[in-house]
Image (spheres, coloured by chain):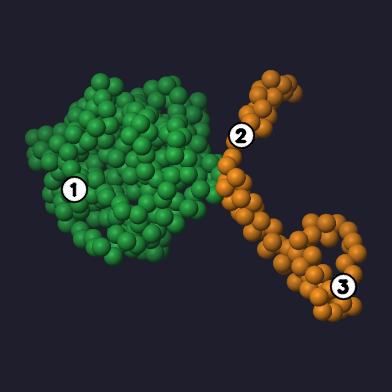
Chain colours: A green, B orange
Amino acid sequence: MSDCRISVRRRTARWDPDAEVSVREAMDFWSFAAAAANVVMQLARPEVGYGVVESKVDSGSILKHPWKRLRTTSQYLAVAVFGSEQDRADFREAVDGVHRRVISTPESPVRYNAFDQELQMWVAACLFAGLEDTYILLRGEMTAEQAEQFYRSAWPLGTTLQVTDDQWPATRAEFDAYWGEACKRVVIEDPVRDYLFELINLRMINPLLGLPFRPLLKFLTIGFLAPVFRDALGVRWSKGKQRRFEWLFLLVAFVNRFLPVFLRQGGSHIVLADVRRRVRAHRSLV
Amino acid sequence: MVININGVLSAVRKLLNFEMTIAEWIGTAILAGIPYLVVGLIWSATHTAHLSGLSGIDRVVSFLGAILSWPVLLVSNVCMM
């Protein structure tokens, strides 16, 4: 199990030890530092990996339309975490429309279907794990009770699509058991690995913009990957890098305390407003 | 034009009820203060005529005062001596 989640030794102290917690607080913009790592985690399940790599939905491809994909993915998170039931229904309908075309062919190395609830549960679990990791780095360790509360508030990450409430492991401890089992299925084969390295090396955006950020993204991405994913991807990490990673987030967590919520989470509310505008104007969401 | 007064009122109430921690107030003040001081520094550095009659500590205080009070100095030439 310890290999399946990142382990951090130095992390910020909690400023509000008894406060109620919710996944909403994990949506500070710094959390997007873990975005690429989360893509690696999701695609590390071969059925998801090949589903994305072989996808015929070019308009949703992160390598072909990276900025659009950034918008749609951040909108999914904003809708799941901050949206109303109506927003979720609208977004589900739009995603279902493209997911219908993501289905394996006889030539595919593995059989997959984007509506497979088990695969969707895996993706939702990755999103939860990523948000929990960033939340703890930014806000400090949670008590067992807070961890339960946080976990329960994160269910719409999956239920916005086809994952059902009873599919989520009932308690945070059961989630750990699910996660430990699911991580045994992590395999990254060459086609998926090549795809992921294109992403981590930012080959899909203008090199003038991509090159300066490449070392930072690589550092953050590998830092947010648990050992099982690092090994599957074939990347190395060191004690020194781990130390720098932890110090970096101690600094970020401190700075973050001084930012008002409209700066920390304003981006999510802007993209959520865009979702509602698109729905009103009958323009496509994804 | 018809203004939905209840809608405006509820938006105002929501705004006035918005809570921020002291740390967030400090951070907001710092973020707002940086551009304010940069403009003040530029204004001060380009409006130095009044400094010629001053020396020593008065000169320094007058210069620093101009950095802080640039919005007032934009509209009126209050006594800087």
Q: What residue is at 61 percent from the left and 50 percent from the top?
A: B26
Q: Are marks 1 and 2 on the same chain?
A: no
Q: What residue is at 79 percent from the left and 56 percent from the top?
A: B71
Q: CA distance from mark 2 to mark 3?
A: 44 Å
Using the image, tell me which numbered label, if any, was put on residue B50. Answer: 3
Q: Residue A230: give x, y in percent of width and height.
A: 20, 53
Q: Report if the CB atoms under discs 2 and 3 are less than 8 Å apart.
A: no
Closer to the chain start, of discs 2 and 3, is 2
Q: Secondary structure at mark 2?
A: loop
Q: CA distance from mark 1 to mark 2?
A: 42 Å
Q: Is residue A71 left or right of residue A219?
A: right
Q: What residue is at 34 percent from the left and 62 percent from the top?
A: A244
Using the image, tell me which numbered label, if any, was put on residue B18. Answer: 2
Identify the subunit bearing mark 2. B
Identify the subunit bearing mark 1. A
Q: CA distance from mark 1 to mark 3?
A: 69 Å
Residue type, numbered disc 3: His
Q: Rate crowding at label 3 as few (under 14), some (14 to 19) or many (20 or more) other CA atoms within 10 Å.
A: few
Q: Nearer the viewer, mark 1 or mark 3?
A: 1
Q: Secondary structure at mark 3?
A: helix
> Total marks drawn?
3
Q: Report if the CB atoms under discs 1 and 2 are less than 8 Å apart.
A: no
Q: Residue A173: give x, y in percent of width and height.
A: 24, 32
Q: Report if the CB atoms under discs 1 and 3 are less than 8 Å apart.
A: no
Q: Is residue A247 visible?
A: yes
Residue type, numbered disc 2: Phe
Q: Are marks 1 and 3 on the same chain?
A: no
Residue type, numbered disc 1: Asp
Q: Residue B46: give x, y in percent of width and height.
A: 77, 71
